Amino acid sequence: MQDFALVTSGAFYIPLLTSHFDTTLSSSAGQHNNSPNLALTADAPGSCWRLPKSKGHLGIGFKSPVILTHISIDHPLTQSSNTMLNAPRDIVVWGFLEHDKNLQRYRSVNQDVDDKPPHDVIEAARRQNPSGSFIKLVHMQYNPFDRKLPVQTFPVYQSILRAGFDFGLIVVEVRGNWGAPETCLCRVRVHGKDIDDELQS
């Protein structure tokens, strides 16, 4: 499946919708860059974006609007239990609805109105587009202990697919990991259809 969340495909992380993080990290090999773009890069296996806490969020923008169908999470296979523990566990992906067509369809989708993205994410998005609204695409649990599936793929809700929403940005919210004080988000993949291709078909 095509991955729309690749930097090489025009995707980018959105600082205003991304948790604060240390830009450089120190290890026995020296200092190295700690950019959210590591989670959007295919040629950096084992390189992960490290959040300083067990929770956090990553805002992802796309080159052009995408009709989302699936989300995939990667975490490298390793013998280290510590590396397993800092894998994300409880994850919610939010799509930001813009434009009248999407917002009109939004009323037809029933969701738990009490479950929302972090407050700072909502405020930052509304400063950019006061009429926009977040909608939950999928709530999933990643299991790093399933060694046969380091890449785990989750479908978005059927109600989202039926509504035919397109999204210019999403927020990946990590609500918890497997017990470590920090979380490593190694790669996020976003699958679906480019809206331009869909309009031409």
Image (tube, helix red, strand yellow):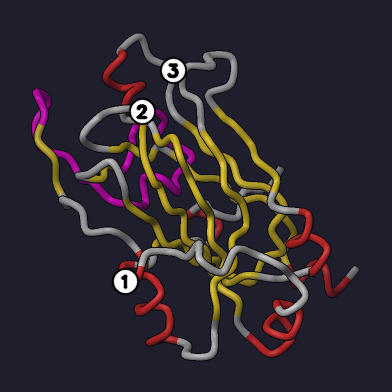
Q: Report how many numbered discs are placed on residues in the image.
A: 3
Under circle 1, the secondary element is: helix
Q: Is residue 139 left or right of residue 13?
A: right
Is residue 29 one of those drawn in magenta?
Answer: yes
Residue 66 in percent (x, y) is at 67, 65
Cβ atoms under marks 3 and 1 closer than 8 Å: no
Residue topped by disc 3: 77
Q: In this picture, which residue range is highlighted in magenta?
A: 27-49
The mark that comes first in sequence, 3 or 1, is 3
Between circles 3 and 1, the one closer to the viewer is 1
**Which residue is at a point 26% across and 45% down the rendered structure image?**
51
Residue topped by disc 2: 178
**22 shown above or below 88:** below
Is residue 47 one of those drawn in magenta?
Answer: yes
The label number, if any, that marks residue 120 in the structure image = 1
Q: Nearer the viewer, residue 91 or 35?
A: 91
Residue 113 in percent (x, y) is at 56, 69
Amino acid type at circle 1 is: Asp
| Disc 3 from disc 1: Cα separation | 33 Å
Amino acid type at circle 3 is: Leu
Amino acid type at circle 2 is: Trp
**Which residue is at a point 59% across and 14% down the rendered structure image?**
148
Residue 179 in percent (x, y) is at 29, 28
| Disc 2 from disc 1: Cα separation | 24 Å
Q: Quadrant of the N terminus?
A: top right
**Which residue is at a point 11% across and 29% down the rendered structure image?**
27
The mark that comes first in sequence, 3 or 2, is 3
